[in-house]
Amino acid sequence: MTLKLVGYIDLPANVKPGGFDHAAVHRAAARVYVAHTCNDALDVIDCASKRYLRSLPKLTGVAGALVSDERNLVFTSNRGENTVGILSPDDESRIAKVNVGVRPNGLAYDPTRNLLLAANAGDPAIANSFTVSIVDVESIALLASIPVPGRTRWAIFDAVSEVFFVNISDPAQIVLIESRNPTRVARVFDIPATGPHGLDLDAASRRLFCACDAGQLITLDASSGKILNTSALSGKPDVIFFNAMLRHLYVAVGDPGVIDVFDTTTMQRAEIIPTKNGAHTIAFDAARNTVYAFLPETHRAMILIDQ
């Protein structure tokens, strides 16, 4: 067994129907920040004591959280108000907001250039609303709005190539935006499975892991886009995280409620860990090899240690 259940953390009760979305870990502060979407709040968990600390309110429809240890920042995508939030773990009460595109979701950040990318899910009823927004964090201002061919999903930044990778649901693609020229789509990688969703990078081997709604995990070369491997998943995935130290990939599947764990050396599935139905989002604390799975029905977080 890799992931071992060691406990649960009670989080605030759901104010309205729904649950959680994306989460991220700030290593220096030893905190998990998770989007409690149905509460319009960011819940904060202490990684060391493994307990709930507080919630940061007034983030309407918050869909994502991203952290930068390099710049000591936390970012939120606030899908219900078309903004991104910027705050410091040292003063969580002060949140600056920037207007971006329609229904921001995925976030990625270049700490060298201090640029935040917001992947906007858009609205089919609104013309030209499938976009990516580029925010200058220092000036707290929108720099560019880049049209993309369809609804965005998750996004990541690769410091080696200085490129943002953004999943597009339909057409099934990953679009590449260069951080040094963040005004257009520079390249496109076609994905041979419907609904690219979760996305992460093995920087050492230069491999992208793309989890798709079709129940497939696609591994591709991050430089060329060449497809290297295809693996079956337990169902429709959402969030994925790569553990570089243990060479494990964690894939959250909300239905039937499991985490698929892959050995990325062989790309074989090592095990399937039961969670609960609807648990489509996880967080990964690399410093402690800990995975948190968020359970919407009971508003709790499962704590799993990778051994």
Image (cartoon, grey):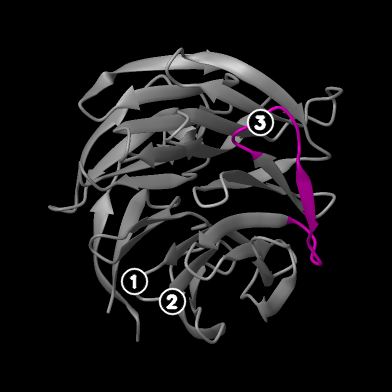
Question: Where does the image place residue 79, in percent across and percent down from the top left?
Answer: 58, 28
Can residue 101 be seen here? The reply is no
Residue for badge 1: 245
Q: Height in image: 170 above or below 103?
A: below
> Whole-Å distance between the Cαs marked 1 and 2?
20 Å
Residue at the far left in the pictured view: 49
Q: Which residues are magenta?
A: 178-195
Q: Height in image: 85 above or below 306?
A: above
In which quadrant of the rendered view does residue 196 lie? bottom right
At 65% from the left and 30% from the top, the residue drawn is: 182
Q: Residues within 10 Å of mark 1 (few under 14, many from 20)?
A: few
Q: Earlier in the sequence, mark 1 or mark 2?
A: 1
Judged from the image, the secondary structure of the residue bearing numbered disc 2 is strand
Q: Earlier in the sequence, mark 3 or mark 1?
A: 3
Question: Where does the image place residue 62, in percent across and percent down from the top left?
Answer: 49, 31
Amino acid type at mark 2: Ile
At 46% from the left and 44% from the top, the residue drawn is: 20
Residue for badge 3: 181
Judged from the image, the secondary structure of the residue bearing numbered disc 1 is loop
Count of labels in the image:
3
Are the residues flagged by discs 3 and 2 in contact, CB closer than 8 Å? Answer: no
Residue for badge 2: 273
Q: Residues within 10 Å of mark 3 (few under 14, many from 20)?
A: few
Amino acid type at mark 3: Asn
Between residue 158 and residue 94, name the one nearer to us.
158
Q: Nearer the viewer, mark 1 or mark 2?
A: 1
Are the residues flagged by discs 3 and 1 in contact, CB closer than 8 Å? Answer: no
> Whole-Å distance between the Cαs marked 3 and 2?
42 Å
Judged from the image, the secondary structure of the residue bearing numbered disc 3 is loop
Q: Nearer the viewer, mark 3 or mark 2?
A: 3
